[in-house]
Structures are given as C-alpha cells and as structure tokens.
Image: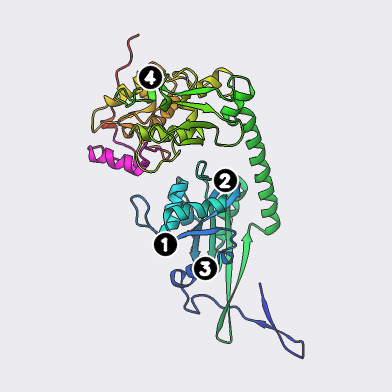
Amino acid sequence: MPLFEIGQPSGTATPINPTTFPALKLWERQDLEAWVTSAPNLAGGDFTVVTSEFDRFDRTSERLDVLGVVKIDEGHGRLVVIELKRDGSSTTVDLQAIKYAAYVASSQFSDIAEMYARHHKVDEDEAKQILIDLLGGDEDAPPTIDSTPRIVLVAGDFRPEVTTTVLWLIDNFEVDIRCVRLQPYEIAGRVIVSTETIIPLPEAEQYRLGVQRKRREVARDQEAARAGRLLPRLIDAGILEIGQSLLFRRDSVPDDAEPPWSRDEPAYSATVETAEGIRTLRWSEPHTGIVRVESPSLLAARILHELGAREGEISSAGINGMHYWTVDGEKSLHELAVENGMRNTSVRRIDRGAVRALLKAIPPGHWTTYGDVARAIGSPGAAQSAASAIASDPLVENAHRVLRANGAISPEWAGTDGSGPMEARSKLEAEGVEFGDGDYADPKDHWQPPLPAS
C-alpha cells in the first residue's frame, strides 16, 4: 500500500519509500506486541486482548504472543491467537500459530477469565463480568468459548510457503485464519505503519462470514427444534405443569446426608415457577428460608454444595440440572424427555450405583475406559452415557482413573471440584501411571473390570 506526500501549494505527489522493521531496529516482543495489545485494529482485529506473553501451557514452556477473544454470537465467543513476525523470512509461522491454537482450544470461560484477570490486573469476578458484557450470557449461563480459535498471522511480509498453506486451510477446511501485513515507513524521524489484511480479501471474508453465520443459524434452529430447553418443552407438551413440585434425585443424595432424603423434606423439593427464561425453579434454603428462583442446573449445584458433595464457588459449571430433578425422585427429567422423544433415544439410562461401585474398585495406579465401565455394568455400547453419568455425579470416586479407549484424558474432563485434565493427569502420575508419546497412559496399567455374569 504505497504512501505519497502531497506538496503544498504545488500539489505534487512524492512517493514515500517503505522500510522494514529490522532496518528500524524494531522487534516483535518489545515493539509489535506492545502496539497490537494497545491497538488490536493494527492486527486487523475486532478482538479484545485477553493476555500476552502467555507461557502457562501444560508440559511446554513455549510462549504465545497475544491471545484475544471475539464475540461470534450472543453468548458465544472465540479465542484469537495472534502470532507476530517482524519480517517475512519465516516459513513456519503458520504451523507455529496452529500449534498455539491447539494448546488453547480446550480453554473454558473460567480459564479465559483467569488469564484476563492476571494480565489486566483486575479481580477475577470483575474479569468475568467484563467478558460477560462483551460476549453475552450471565452468571447462571456464562458465554461458551468454542474450540476453534481464530488465527491471525501478523508480519512485515509473507513467503509463498505460508500464503499457500493459509489459502489451502481456508478453502478446504474453513479454518478461521488471516494474514495481516504491516508496512513501516519512516517520515521525519517518526515511524508510520500501514496495516492490510491480505488473506482473506475483504470481499471474500464478508461472504465467508455470511455463509458461516447462516450455517450456525440453521444448526441452532435444528438443535432448538430437536432439543431446546427441556423444562419449558416438557411444560409445553403437558408432561409438567407450572406450580408442580419436583424432587431432587434420590441417588444424588449421600446416604448419610443431613437431612436424609425424603419426599416430604423441603430441602429436596422445588416448584416449577415459569416456562420462560433461565430461572425456572423456586426453592427455599433450609437454614435461612431465603427463597430463590434459579435455573435447574444452578439450583442442583447449590444443593450439592449444601450436601458437601461440591466445594468452592457455587456454579452450574459441569452440572446439567435435567439429570438431577425428577417427578418421582428416581427418573430424571432428561430420561423423561427421552421417553417422550425430546432427546436422542441413543442416550441410555445408566445405573449410577453400579458406576460408583465400579469406579471405587479401580486400583490406584491403574486406569480403565468408559467403554470398559459400560460393559462391566451391563450396558455395552453405552460409553458416552457412562461418561455423562461419571461427569455429572459428584458422589463418584476416582473419576480421574477413567480414560478414553486409547488411554488419553478427555480434554473436556472436569472434576466436580472444578479441576481439569491437568489435575487428572497429576493424580494418575502421583499414583504411578506413566504417560508416553501422544500423552497416552501406559497400557500396562490398564485395568479390565470384571464383566457381569451372563
């Protein structure tokens, strides 16, 4: 993008010769990174900076230049990985950025809030509110962060090896990846920088975004038609009624709970308040009498905290209330929805008691798989349902000892105490389980649970 100096009053136009960042002795970390964090538009950005110089990846000390987040839809955000190079000599800048994108792809809203708080030196609760204001959602239903980060390559120029790869990724895999060229000029001792997105071209980008937006709308409409919010749909179908009492699921309450589970115990009863919005259940705190109207998931989390089954901040993260609330104390609303064709019938009912007993029996220093668990409790082929039951049950012990079929820890693994995959691995390694290439647990430590008698 050539620049011209216009002479006055002659009206002559004199071209201003471009220079390079190396010639100006400007560097990626001290200069380009500082510019981008202070003015994201320099990197073609509609994103908000979350952090920079991030090097807290698991088992590697590599450093990501700048990490941002951008709103995609209401309540839906996407991470933005910005990789900076001061010249066009690199032939691997694309691969480096893809690697960083893979490192952060599993980050959840709470992780992003923690990074934001540390970088911007604010309280974590304030960081969460800032991000909620930016992305949409609320405390009960915080915004989701998708697992496909945008990649922005920023450099003084790009070699053909890079641009060819970027175009191929866009055309064949619809990767959200961009090349932004920065061109410096020196004018009267001042540095002027022009910024230009060279891939994708603006016209093509608008078209691509329009197509992606339409696809998301169609997928969202299909999902809403297929599932939607189950409690309002159960009400609309006449299966539940406004004012009806629901019971907290009996097998989610420990045997030694105080007060013990009972149909007549108010602590385990809530009333359907409304079919509109997120806050749909009315419940009275047993100790204070405070009346709360909350989502089924947040209310389930609150009761689990009362029972001592969850610790830390009261949050609906990792909790699906449809698995905890029932009409009869036994069959969950999720199972009720399945019976009435509102959920995929491939989701099978899992005997939670059998799952708890089996996981309790896994020896320390060993691991098993979700498929092994499903077969051992008499539900072969229900590995996904077994995984859901384990993830949603705060009374399950040794959940960290259940892995994928290849011995990998699921990147979505979450303990009921808020821990994640790294904590699960740490526990296994402390017990003596070794992890090899590809982060797969050693097969010699695989424990095969006994199959049920036929």
Frontmost residue, 184 versus 52:
52
SS class, disc 1 = loop
Decide which of tag 2 and tag 1 comes sooner along the chain: 2
**Residue carrying label 3:** 38
SS class, disc 3 = helix
Question: Which region of the structure is painted magenta?
Answer: 413-442
C-alpha span from label 2 to label 1: 24 Å
Q: What residue type is labelled 2?
A: Gly
Decide which of tag 4 and tag 1 comes sooner along the chain: 1
Circle 3 packing at 10 Å, graded few (<14), some (14-19), many (20+), is: few
Q: Residue at x 74, y 89 (%)?
A: 8
The correct choice, above or below, for 300 with respect to 179 in the image is above
Q: In the rendered structure, are the residues bearing label 4 and label 3 in contact, judged by CB atoms less than 8 Å apart?
A: no
Q: Which amino acid does label 4 sit on?
A: Arg
C-alpha span from label 4 to label 1: 49 Å
Q: Nearer the viewer, mark 4 or mark 1?
A: 1
**Residue carrying label 2:** 75
* Position of residue 430 measured from the top left corner of the image (x, y, whole percent): 23, 40
Query: Residue 338 lies in what quarter of the image?
Result: top right
Q: Which amino acid does label 1 sit on?
A: Lys
**Residue carrying label 4:** 375
C-alpha span from label 2 to label 4: 38 Å
C-alpha span from label 4 to label 3: 55 Å
Q: In the rendered structure, are the residues bearing label 2 and label 1 in contact, judged by CB atoms less than 8 Å apart?
A: no
Q: In the image as oriented, which residue stretches furthest toward the top?
A: 454
Q: Which amino acid does label 3 sit on?
A: Ser
**Residue carrying label 1:** 121
The correct choice, above or below, for 194 with respect to 367 in the image is below
